[in-house]
Image (cartoon, rainbow, N blue to C red):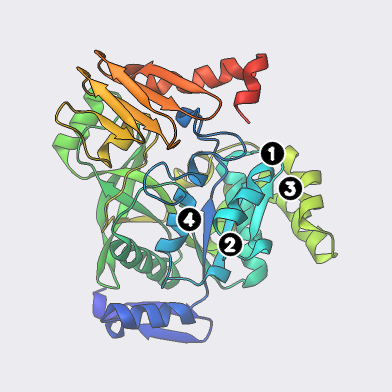
């Protein structure tokens, strides 16, 4: 079916041809008429960004890249796509107050604190129940809280097209980021046949998802073409994802119904989560649903994207000095090269002399010094600290 004959489903009683969504202002106006929600997953601990990232205020609640917290940047990019009242944030209980502090325009009733982390399938299932209570005919997106994206207009255009696809057809949709180097830290999506066009964006079937590859395999993907980084962004209608959860994770879905029934009976969500959430199956949405779903499509990201998963990644977003050093804060570097120095304390000077390829992070109560090659192991350092008296430096 060609693009002119496709439709964009905007609600239970209104069908509008994609051809009328000719320009961005019209798309934004019509998007506000549709029943669309965004659920932001913001429960991570950001352990690879210790000591700046802590349990109560992790990476997504800090200005790791940029001048405002990364979650606040994510919410701001959604302006014009959905109103603040249509945004849910699923975080953990100990971070909920901090989320409301950095995003004061959010509806407090839509900032949900998990009493314990049960991985992303539980978060998606909970989101499905909550959005369904708002509107059983709605569609919604699940987005990460901490991606670095500079092109907000391109992001919104891609998200509009993804919403249009899942509202027109009973499919699940995801975003693939064109691979620019053989990354081993990302999962990949292999693009399949063309599915159609929505809001001027091509949509493709997904041939398969693949886990994080070794370097040789990643190089093969890059050379072959048609492989995209998995950005962890998903879109679906309430009905489509509920059906997939019920089919693929029946025990999880059945357990979540107890929360829904409790809400019907007038019980509070916080108490219901404390009672039922710890017993939920712990599994990722990728394993539980995405890799099993038969009708899943992808859109190519029409925007820049960076996962920024560890300290060396911030070097891609700040200028380097002639010796390759990237610094933030008051620093003095002599005969030093290719270092990353991060200190947001304006009264503290960090000086490096005669060293290379180091990460140096200074906070008010802890200092990290490690080689860039050990950045992935910061998470293991955090685990070691958690077993000792030094765990006060993790909070």
The answer to which of marks 3 and 4 sits earlier in the sequence is: 4
Q: Is residue 284 left or right of residue 197?
A: right
**Other-residue count near label 3 (Cα within 10 Å), few / some / many at <14 / 14–19 / ≥20:** some
Q: Nearer the viewer, residue 201 or 349?
A: 349
Question: Label for residue 72?
Answer: 4
For label 3, the residue is: 255
Marks 4/1: CA–CA distance? 23 Å
Marks 4/2: CA–CA distance? 9 Å
Marks 2/1: CA–CA distance? 24 Å
The answer to which of marks 3 and 2 sits earlier in the sequence is: 2
For label 1, the residue is: 116
The percent position of residue 391, horizontal first and vertical second, equals 64, 21
Q: Nearer the viewer, residue 353 or 31?
A: 353
The answer to which of marks 2 and 1 sits earlier in the sequence is: 2
The percent position of residue 306, horizontal first and vertical second, equals 32, 44
Task: Check whether the beta carbons of the residues at disc 3 and disc 2 lie within 8 A of each other.
Answer: no
Whether residue 213 can be seen here? no
Marks 3/4: CA–CA distance? 32 Å
Q: Is residue 261 left or right of residue 147?
A: right
For label 2, the residue is: 104
């Amino acid at each position: 079916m060609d693009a002119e004959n496709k439709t964009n489903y905007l609600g239970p009683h209104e069908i509008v041809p994609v051809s009328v969504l000719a320009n961005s202002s019209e798309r934004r106006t019509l998007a506000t008429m549709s029943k669309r929600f965004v659920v932001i997953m913001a429960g991570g601990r950001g352990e690879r960004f210790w000591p700046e990232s802590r349990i109560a205020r992790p990476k997504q609640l800090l200005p790791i890249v940029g001048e405002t917290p990364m979650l606040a940047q994510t919410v701001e990019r959604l302006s014009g796509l959905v109103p603040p009242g249509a945004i849910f944030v699923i975080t953990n209980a100990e971070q909920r107050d901090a989320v409301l502090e950095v995003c004061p325009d959010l509806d407090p009733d839509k900032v949900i604190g998990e009493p314990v982390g049960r991985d992303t399938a539980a978060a998606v299932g909970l989101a499905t129940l909550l959005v369904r209570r708002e509107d059983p005919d709605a569609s919604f997106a699940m987005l990460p809280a901490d991606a670095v994206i500079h092109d907000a207009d391109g992001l919104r255009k891609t998200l509009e097209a993804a919403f249009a696809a899942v509202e027109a057809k009973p499919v699940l949709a995801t975003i693939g980021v064109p691979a620019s180097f053989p990354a081993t830290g990302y999962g990949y999506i292999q693009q399949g046949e063309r599915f159609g066009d929505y809001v001027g964006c091509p949509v493709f079937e997904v041939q398969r998802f693949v886990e994080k590859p070794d370097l040789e395999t990643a190089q093969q993907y890059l050379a072959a073409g048609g492989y995209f980084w998995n950005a962890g962004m998903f879109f679906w209608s309430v009905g489509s994802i509920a059906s997939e959860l019920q089919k693929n994770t029946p025990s999880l879905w059945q357990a979540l119904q107890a929360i829904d029934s409790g809400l019907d009976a007038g019980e509070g969500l916080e108490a219901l989560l404390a009672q039922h959430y710890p017993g939920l199956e712990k599994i990722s949405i990728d394993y539980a649903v995405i890799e099993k779903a038969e009708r899943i499509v992808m859109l190519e990201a029409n925007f820049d994207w960076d996962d920024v998963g560890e300290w060396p990644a911030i070097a891609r977003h700040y200028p380097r000095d002639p010796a390759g050093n990237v610094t933030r804060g008051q620093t003095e570097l002599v005969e030093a090269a290719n270092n990353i120095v991060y200190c947001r304390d304006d009264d503290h000077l960090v000086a490096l002399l005669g060293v290379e390829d180091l990460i140096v992070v200074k906070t008010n109560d802890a200092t990290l010094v490690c080689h860039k090659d050990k950045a992935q192991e910061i998470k293991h350092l955090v685990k070691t600290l958690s077993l000792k008296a030094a765990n006060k430096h993790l909070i």
